[in-house]
Image (tube, rainbow, N blue to C red):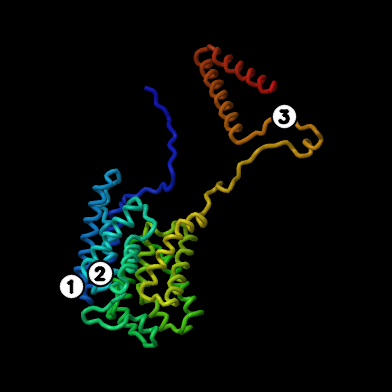
Amino acid sequence: MKRRMVKAFESAPFVRSRITTGDLMYFVVLALLPCAGMGIYRYGLHAALLVGISVGTALVSEFVCDWIWKSRTSSVMDYSCIVTGLIGGLILPPAAPYWAGAAIAALAIILFKHAFGGLGHNLLNPAMAAKCVLLLVCRSMMLDLSAKGYSGAAPLALLQSGETPDLAGMLTGNVPGYIGTSSALAVLAAAGILFLAGLIDLTVPLASLISFSVCYVLIGRYGLSPYTLAIQICGGSFLFTAFVMAEDFTTSPVSQAARIWYGLIFGSAVFWLRKAGLYEDAVVYALLLVNFLRPLLDKKLAPKPFGAAAKKWIIKEPKKRRALGTETSTPEITNEALDQEFLKFQEQIEKEARGLEAARYTGDDTLLQKALAEAQQENGNSRDE
C-alpha cells in the first residue's frame, strides 16, 4: 500500500491548549463572585434574586437557542451563558423588578448572542447591549439606584450638584449603585483574579484610565483634584466596565496597538458622555461605541506578517532596450510562470535521479537515457520559443 504525503494548509492561530472555553468561563465566574457577594451583602435578598433570575433565564435561553440552531455546537454547558447572565444581573439596579433580570438575560442571549451567530460571533457585548435596550425602553427604572437602606442620589450626581460623595463608601459599596459595580474594592479583586489567571492583560483598562484621567485633568470641572478624580473613576460602573466587560474575549481587539486605541477611545468617550450629562449610563454607550469600532481597529492596526507587504513583481526588459527599438514580443514573466517552470525543472531532476539510481543498481540505463533525451528536447523547445 502506497503512502501519499499530503500538505495540510491551516489558518492561524496554531497554539494548542488543554484549556477549554468552559475552563475560561469557570474562572470568570469565580472572579465575579466578590462583586456578586458584596452587592448581595449590601442590597439584600432582592438583589440576590435578581442575579439568580438573570442567570437562570440565561441558561434556559441558551438551551432553547441550542435546540433551535441544532447545526451549531452546543454551548449550554460551557458556562458562557452563566457568565452573561451573571454580568447582566450585576449591572442591574438593586431595586429593579424581577422581570428586568429575566429581560436582560433573554435579550443578551437570544438577540445579541445567538442572533449574531452564537459564541464568538457577536459584535456587541451581549449584557451591555441588553442593558442599553432597557435604558431606552424604561430609562427611569434603570437609573433608579435606591434600595433598602440606600436612598438619595448616586455619587456622580452628588458630585455634579456640588456635594462631596463618600469615597470610602464607594470603595466598599456602601452607596447607591448597581448590584455588582458599586464596590471599587470588589471590582479590583475580580480584576486581580482575572489577571492572575491570565484572562486579561490590563492593556485596555490602563489605557482607559489614562485617557479618562488626562481628559478630566485638562478639561474637567475640578481640574487636578485627586479626590474628585478618584470619585469619577470609582463611580458610574467605570472600573467594572473597563476591567471586566471591555476585556470580553469576543468584542475586544486582538493586536496590542488596537487594544491600546480601544482603551483610549473608551476612556475619552466616557469622559465626554459624562460631560454631556450622562453619568451612570455613560459607560454603556461608550462600550458599545468601541465595540462597533473594534473590527476597524483590528483591520487597520493588525501587525503585518512577514512578507505580507511584498507586491506582485513582473520581470520586464530594461527601459533602454525598449527605447532603442529592440523590444521583442517575449511575454512578461510573472510569479505564476516562474512557479510552473520550477515545477517542471524539479520533475525533470527527479526523473534523472530515478534513472541514475536504476542504472546503478540494475545496470539498465534506459530510464536515464530517456530522461536525458526529454531534457534535451525540452531545452530545444525552449530555444525555439
Viewer-nearest of labels 2 and 1? 1
The residue under label 2 is 36
Q: What x and y, as percent, mark residue 42?
A: 23, 77
Q: Tell me, for residue 329, which label it has, or none.
A: 3
The percent coordinates of residue 353 (x first, y second) are 54, 22
Report, in whole angstroms, how far the alpha carbon at label 1 lies from the one at label 3.
87 Å
**Residue shown at the point (45%, 70%) measured from the top left:** 269
Total numbered labels: 3
Identify the disc placed on residue 45: 1
Nearer to the camera, 282 or 251: 282
**Are the residues at dot 2 and dot 1 in contact (C-beta closer than 8 Å)?**
no
Furthest residue to the right? 324
> What is the secondary structure assignment of the residue under circle 2?
helix
**In contact (CB < 8 Å): disc 1 and disc 3:** no
Instruction: Identify the residue at image location x=58%, y=30%.
Output: 342
Query: In which image quadrant can residue 125 be found?
Result: bottom left
> What secondary structure is marked by label 3?
loop
- Whole-angstrom CA distance, mark 2 to mark 1, is 12 Å
